[in-house]
Amino acid sequence: MLTARGVFASIILFVLSIAVPIRCEEDPYERYVKTSVDFKRVKQDKDWLLKAYPSWLFMPWYYQWTIGHTDASGALCNEVGFNGGFVDRGDTSHLAWLDKYKLHFYMDHTAGKGDLHLWDGSIPKPQVPAVHGTGIRFKPVNAAMKTRLEKIIKQNIEAVKASPNRSAYALDDEISWGHFAHPTMWQITDDASAYSKWLAEIYGTNAPKKAGWVSYNDILPKLSGWDVASFDASPLMDQWSFNDSYWNNFLGGLVDYSNSVDDATPCGFVGGQSPCAFGGFDYAKQMRKIQYLEAYNMGGSQSIIRSFNPHNAVPTVTSYFHRSTDDCLWQLWYYIAQGNRGEIGWVEKWFNDDKTPKDWIKTCAPQFIEAGQKIGPMMSGAEWKHDGVALYYSHASIQLGWIMDAQAHGKTWISRNGDDKLGASHLVRRAWMDMLRDEGIQSNWVSYVDVVQNGVPKEYSVLILPGALCLSDVEAKRIREFCENGGTVIADYMPGLWDQHGKGRANGGALDDLFGVKHSPTMMLKDVFNGGKLWCEVDQDANFSYKSFTTFMTNKNTCIHDASGFNKAVREMDVIKTKKVGKGTAVLMNLSPQWYNAHRIAGSKDAARRSVFMTPIHNSGVARWVGIKGANEKEFGYEITYWTQGKRTILFVVSNLALSGSELGGGNAVGLKSDVVPITLEFAKAIQNAKDERTGKSLGSGKEFKFDWKQNEACVMTFDSN
């Protein structure tokens, strides 16, 4: 018989057994980013990668290597500092020669050619409808392709893996799920269930029903009539994100397979393009799937790749196309200063009468040797230092930016190319990077993946949101937490008015509460930038072949040009709204920084207009700690990079210049100076045991150090780290 106390206890137990607390549904996008294979890394162990690819290599691509593979040409390579080479598709015809002269090489086209890279040159006319249509990639990425490519990979690797000088395998050159980074609408695979499964993974129970593959033609007519709340680019952006994921997972699988055939050599690809809506170049995904990369420096790709390269362990190199001796040396030093581990040189007319090297090779030889034998080994394993400033990488915003930018082209959007030179996301990114470098502040990119998974890293005190139009709820939450905990968050314009799928938010921006503003969900074209024609700042069709940034920013432009020297984004909203949030500060500029690309070319006086964007960074406590004392117009455009290597800091002074180049490579300097300029490096605090690494001279300790800087080369010094 139960006592009164027993009855009461039984009731309590019963109530507890049925009173299961109601749980809020987990954010499916957060779960997706934290758990999906889309973000799983291939092997990227630092010690393993450094053992395979330990230093800096200059690797001629033997297109017109007219001097053969003989004892004479081998001796020449050693003499001029060509300390690397390449083989193609398992070709062993000169493998013994590479081994004899100890030339470390990469193998190109390890997976053949014609599957990952579909065709050479411009798009053949018969393929145009397929590329821009809504069908299946004419060589679908699927299990059959995987089986075919694995057979090729195995055959090619087996042919060369006995060589002690192999350093990397490149699956193919200039790969893409489309054609380079050209506008491409097709579906990557013929696996009928793959897209629906992916949608279910990323959306959870609210996954949209797949209603057929869409094209930009389905979005374009709606852009002029949409307000923010009704704006919905998700059908198109989801397709692109799916293609990116499927593609990069496929590459990661081939990299894993390559490792199974040769577990001592990294694998990746060459010919990387700018971050883009097309082709697979979401570098937050791609840098998790490769172990080796040559990428062209377009759209800030080098900075992004370095930032997403764990411990700078994945060997990244650049392409070299010869233009002049001065340019050759600038590229060598600039890219070493940025952390690159070598160059792939396009051999074309490098030899007189096909026999003897041209004068530029002899002139550059001492510095090739210096890079390969001295500075390169010193940089092996070094890790980038920043000044506590992070730039936010939102690939969804790059996608939506393209959708807005291409509106100006109308039906001719299919011919749009060179997006890195036109697109707002690219030019805003460029402006932020150059403003910071000119201010003497080094930064890193942090990706949406890292922030969703782990929040904004505590090593940063400032987070900048460049053109971050699209933010998920969880990204906004993490950014808010960073600010509340003491960080400074700076957005240029319209942050988070759209979600990660490109769907407009019905209640204003995801961070409006953070910044203390209200973006109206009824905003339309008339309310932003030019006041009625386009969603973006510049008519990129009217300026498709612009000759200067000033023309680009002014031709057919009716933006409100603020007194600061930059264009307003939301026309009726004030500029520079600052709000204290918890322990931190939030700043919404409501200005686009694109004009800085023109101000910078005009010179140091106009470039000083960057102060409107730099002031909130300085207010956070970030300041330059080393610079050229008394720098003026002659020195303007210099950049200082710094690295840690054990207990030493490695510091470079280089020229940060605009670049020429295309999807086929390049990266030659624009506006190159080669003067010898006496400079004094001035430190905020005294440093200890400094050394000029190029001359070998000990510089002692102190706050000021004198150098003669040849502006197309580098000053390199080391000192004890704090």
Image: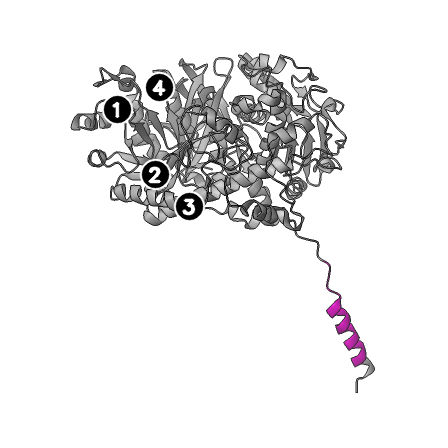
Identify the residue position indicated by label 2 in the image.
Answer: 110
Q: Residue at x 48, y 39 (%)?
A: 286
Q: Looking at numbered disc 4 in the image, what kind of residue is underneath it?
A: His
Left or right, residue 612 beside residue 126: right
Left or right, residue 343 beside residue 604: left
Seen from the viewer's position, the closer of residues 186 and 631 is 186
Q: Residues within 10 Å of mark 2 (few under 14, many from 20)?
A: many
Identify the residue position indicated by label 3 in the image.
Answer: 144
Q: CA distance from mark 3 to mark 2?
A: 17 Å
Seen from the viewer's position, the closer of residues 625 and 689 is 625
**In the image, residue 568 above or below residue 133:** above
Q: CA distance from mark 2 to mark 4?
A: 26 Å
Percent position (x, y) of residue 700? 39, 29
Q: CA distance from mark 1 to mark 2?
A: 21 Å
Nearer the observer: mark 4 or 3; the answer is 3
Q: Looking at numbered disc 1 in the image, what kind of residue is underneath it?
A: Trp
Q: Which residues are magenta?
A: 6-22
The kind of secondary structure the magenta stretch mainly shows is: helix
Give residue 65's mark.
Answer: 1
Nearer the observer: mark 2 or 4; the answer is 2
Q: Earlier in the sequence, mark 2 or mark 4?
A: 2
**Are the two marked residues, 1 and 2, in contact with CB atoms closer than 8 angstroms?**
no
Q: Looking at numbered disc 2 in the image, what kind of residue is underneath it?
A: Thr
Give residue 322's mark.
Answer: 4
Nearer the observer: mark 3 or 2; the answer is 3
As drawn, which residue projects farthest toward the left?
A: 71
Left or right, residue 21 beside residue 195: right
**In the image, residue 180 above or below residue 554:** below
Which quadrant: the N terminus?
bottom right
